[in-house]
Image (cartoon, rainbow, N blue to C red):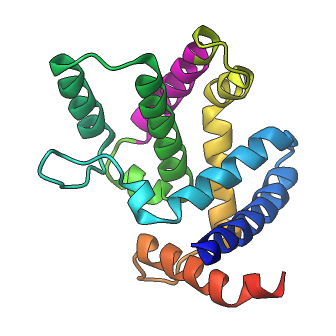
Amino acid sequence: MGKMIISNDRLKSFFLQCAQRSFRELGLNDSAITDYVASVLTTFAHTDHLYRVRTPKGRRLDSVVEMLSAYLNLADRARHPVQREREFRKYVGDYTLFMSGLFRTHVEQDGVLDYYFSEGRRSYMKVSELDVALYHTGFLLFQELSKNFEYYSGALDYMRKAYFAPLPGEDPFGQFLRNVEGWMKTNLSDN
């Protein structure tokens, strides 16, 4: 288990460096946002975290509409504490940011980019509101992510184009995961 923690720390450091460089090139200099985005990238580099919402039969959900529907159907059967809603909304915000940023072409091909922008903004604003209600610090971070969701998504798209471009004809998801594995084995060992 210790090795995984070290690997995640190294991976986070790598993503933080990429995000800082990309965001700085675009004039986005908020260190809290940059750190948060690097954390999202680190978390979602593991597919079990990226696709953590599943049907009762275990099928992973990769559609935001399906995720929201599953959550609402679950919410109809039982009441969930505010913390659970916050966790779900944060996940949806993170997922839409990740997908609309690093996998924008895929999201555009499905014709849902504007929906991802809208749902990402809505989810992060809900997290901010719930943080205020729960007396959590950090609600301003989620307000900022909501307010400028498209900018941060665009910065991730820029970062993808500048640093993570897949080879022609390659599956972008598979290429991204292979890149992450390679960074973990080679590039990051030099840090």
Residue drawn at x 68%, y 57% is 158
Residue drawn at x 66%, y 31% is 145
Residue drawn at x 56%, y 27% is 124
In the picture shown, does residue 109 fall above or below 153?
Answer: below
Q: Residue 96 location in percent, x, y?
A: 47, 42
Q: Quadrant of the N terminus?
A: bottom right
Q: Camera-side residue: 187 or 175?
A: 187
Number of numbered discs: 0
Q: Residue 4 location in percent, x, y?
A: 59, 73
Q: Residue 156 location in percent, x, y?
A: 64, 53
Q: Camera-side residue: 158 or 132?
A: 132
Dominant SS type (magenta): helix
Magenta range is 113-130
Query: Can the viewer see residue 13?
Result: yes
Question: Left or right: where does residue 152 sit relative to residue 181?
Answer: right
Question: Left or right: where does residue 67 sit relative to residue 163?
Answer: left
Query: Can the viewer see residue 155?
Result: no
In the picture shown, does residue 44 fall above or below 78?
Answer: below
Question: Left or right: where does residue 171 sit relative to residue 180?
Answer: left
In the picture shown, does residue 50 fall above or below 127?
Answer: below
Q: Camera-side residue: 5 or 29?
A: 5
Q: Quadrant of residue 113?
A: top left
Q: Camera-side residue: 19 or 136?
A: 136
In the picture shown, does residue 112 fall above or below 6?
Answer: above
Q: Residue 101 location in percent, x, y?
A: 56, 51
**In the image as oriented, which residue stretches furthest toward the left?**
57
User: In the image, is residue 84 part of the stretch drawn in magenta?
Assistant: no
Residue drawn at x 65%, y 27% is 142
**In the image as oriented, which residue stretches furthest toward the bottom?**
186
